[in-house]
Image: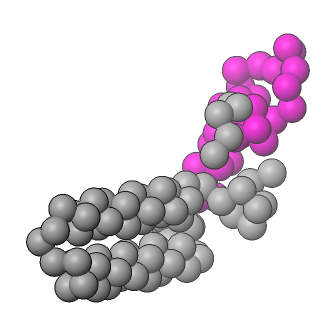
Amino acid sequence: MSTDPFAALGLPVRNDLTSEQIRAAWRQIAAATHPDRPDGGDIARGRPLRLALRGIAAAIMSAVVMQLIGGQPAGPAVVTGIITWFVLTGRGDLAPRRDGKDGTR
């Protein structure tokens, strides 16, 4: 995820940008990704489904690990790793799209 605010808003890095131009870029992104849009914004684009499938995969992997390893100290450690994987990969499904298909520039 980019930490450059200009890149996040799709604006060029220039000293003469006005606050109104920045607000307009922000409003455009917010309008394109808002869930109350008639097309559902990002919700209708399959991203929550991928997040749910990833969550199911993490739960299944955790259950298998706990069955195989049991109460040994490595069991909770591996499950913690699986949960960390889920959180780190799931953030992309919750963030605004960067491929230009969400109506942003």
Q: Residue at x 68, y 40 (%)?
A: 2
Q: Which residues are magenta?
A: 6-33
Q: In the orientation shown, which residue stands out farthest toward the top?
A: 15
Residue 30 in magenta stretch: yes
| Magenta span: chief secondary structure | helix
| Image spot of residue 59 (x, y percent) | 30, 79
Q: Residue furthest left?
A: 71
Say above or below: 94 vs 28: below
**Is residue 85 something one can see in this rendering?**
yes
Residue at left offset 58%, top offset 49%: 30
Q: Quadrant of residue 4?
A: top right
Give the left or right position of residue 98, taking residue 56 as reference: right
Residue at image coords 85%, 14%? 15
Classify residue 23 as left or right of residue 59.
Answer: right
> How many numbered marks does the figure carry?
0
Q: Is residue 15 above or below residue 86?
A: above
- Image coordinates for residue 92, horizontal then vertical, percent: 56, 59
Q: Look at the image and name its color scheme.
A: one colour
Using the image, determine if residue 11 lies above or below residue 14.
below
In this view of the protein, which residue sits in the foreground, 98 or 103? Answer: 98
In magenta segment, residue 1: no
Left or right of residue 3, residue 55 in this image: left
The answer to whether any part of residue 83 appears in the image is no
Residue 94, percent from left and from top: 49, 59
In depth, the one of 3 and 99 nearer the eye is 3
Q: Position of residue 39 (x, y in %)?
A: 58, 75
